[in-house]
Image (spheres, rainbow, N blue to C red):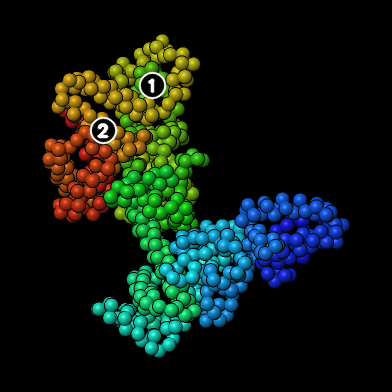
Amino acid sequence: MATTANILTLLKFYASKQKSPMVDYDEFADYIRRYAGHHLEENPDLVKYMGASSQTLDTEISELTANHQVIVAPVGNKDFIHVVPSYVEQFANSYKLIDANIAVPFPNFNDLGKHTPHEIVTTKPLAELLYSMLEGTQDAEPVLYSSAVAKGIPALLVPSTVPATTIVNLALRKIQNIMHKDEVHDYFLKKLTISNPGKEISAKNFFKKFCSKADEALEFLSNTGETFYYWSQLCYFLRQDYIKVKDFTPEDINILQSVGILEVATSYYKTKATERQQRDAALKILELQLNQPPYYYNHSDIKDFKDSNGAPLLGQYSEEDLNAHLKHMTQDSSDGELPPLLIFRITENEGYFILKEKVMPLIMRLTSDARVLVRESLIKSWYKIMREWDTLPEMKDNAAFERCLSKEIQSCAPILHAILGASFLPVISLEDHTPGHINLYRNEALIPLSELLMLSRAEIYIDARIKLPFWYTIPGISWIISLLARPPKNKRNKARNGKSATAALMEEKRHKEEEKERELDVKDRGDASKNRKRQLRKAAGEAEKLLVPSSSSLDRELEGYLHEWNDRIGKQNFDDLTQDVNSLIRDYLRKVMRSLKTENFSMERISSLADSLVESPVMLKIHNHPALKRYVELYLVKLVKNLP
């Protein structure tokens, strides 16, 4: 052993030399003085143990006693140091002997020496002890535990250094050992089969597998699902038979201790199996939620997912499970294919998850939504510019127009802008074979945004110009007026450097809606019926904030999801189905409104109403239920928001 000044290390070394964890205090003090004198040159820290006084040693022994590493107790006229780690090592060796010869009994409380103080052991219930050991949360310092198994049975001694799986495995082997006796084997097999009428074959297969494969018993126990009932029954029958014995033999004690260990292990693995099933079920619900509109979710959104009962999924699985599952879904791929779940980023710190098969449908919907908004905003913006007798580069130049569209999309549809710039899009576009497929790439480059949005610079320019008074289009006169009426260049540049046309239009609409709502609030005050409707409109506005992205609008979202679930070919068929569904939603809301309380019109309530409608026999004929459900939610919000 290398020289050391650590007193606990020296105590353990001395105890091993004496072959006893019980060390004479005075003899150890003398040994320390001699050890310090012999090794002083190698380790100068040993100088504190030199000399006749043992004050330093007494102080350090007191500290070890306070930490429950040693116990000092008198035996006759002498004081003895009981070294806890040495006791732990001694009884850990007992488990090695059992492993070599399964007939050797488990160490129990009676195996402690006559002069060993009871403070050496730490009493702990067997279930609590094995659960913590199986979870890997036991104490870091060596501890000798004492756990009672049954009344009248000596408590089991369990060193903290012995793995819990070793203890459980030894208990299984001990029970297997007695089952190898023919009369015992047949007796318990008969009891097990009689207790399970109609399941005799299943019970026999369980018993046969347990008895025949000694080296696989622990794996069989920890991975079983439906057979936990058989494990519990077997333990019950064993305990029932052996507890009746009046004078316990060492073998009886051994079996009862093994049964106690097996009962705790069965309970632990059953709990783990239940948690595993719950976690797996919750993760499947999570994957179904990712298939729901709006199809893109950030990490915070996914953490807030709930099941059909409104219970948060986070809790049915841990945050570590969630992160591991998301990592698996975003990294697991075969044959060089993209993983099922993809990530795209709007900013460096803001990213979203989206399922691979939802990328192209989302692009189509967002493109359709953005086209209407961008076209409307550009016409209005260009009209204002031309009223000022001014022009913009994007009115005349295609390259400038493309840059303008990119800026507008980034403003009104940041999700679309981010996906169009994602590295995975070329592969997705190449693999896409959905109906209405759009070829997003030409010559290995993204097609122009004007082509993707189906927007013509010339058409927008003409539509904006048509709104102008006639004198703006008279040659000569318009040029003279423009020279006189055009604002200074610095004012024009200042106006152009503000928000994008789309953002300005959206903000203007939002202000108008808020002003309209305030006016309605003032009118409705004092009237109970109108006040109820005002509260419902307010609740609908809060739900709208959750359902509609800030860069979109309620009508745009409705239009987008309408084209997802309504797959009827022909304008008349399309319009008829839309009208039928809308009428059904209105009729349903009319009935619900009679008993609907203002405080109950929450997102959970809206989702519940939508589920009831979507699952009705009439709606079951429509295929795309996720899009249909989101459409119903949005339409309900729109109806309530527009209550007269």
Q: Which of the two labelled residues, at mark 2 and mark 1, occupies the earlier sequence position?
A: 1
Residue situated furthest bottom in the rendering = 182
> Which secondary structure, mark 1?
helix
The answer to whether 364 is drawn above or below residue 478 in the figure is below
* Residue type for callout 2: Ala
Residue situated furthest top in the rendering = 484
Foreground pick, 607 / 583 = 607
At 72% from the left and 61% from the top, the residue drawn is 25
2 vs 1, front mark: 2
Residue 204 % position (x, y):
34, 82
At 47% from the left and 19% from the top, the residue drawn is 494
Asked whether residue 336 appears in the rendered view, the answer is no
Q: CA distance from mark 2 to mark 1?
A: 39 Å
| Residue 539: image tag | 2
User: Dot 2: within a 10 Å radius of its alpha carbon, few (fewer than 14), some, or many (20 or more) residues?
Assistant: many
Residue 263 % position (x, y):
41, 69
In the rendered image, which quarter is residue 550 located in?
top left
* Residue type for callout 1: Ile
Give the labeled residue for mark 1.
385
Asked whether residue 239 appears in the rendered view, the answer is yes
| Residue 529: image tag | none
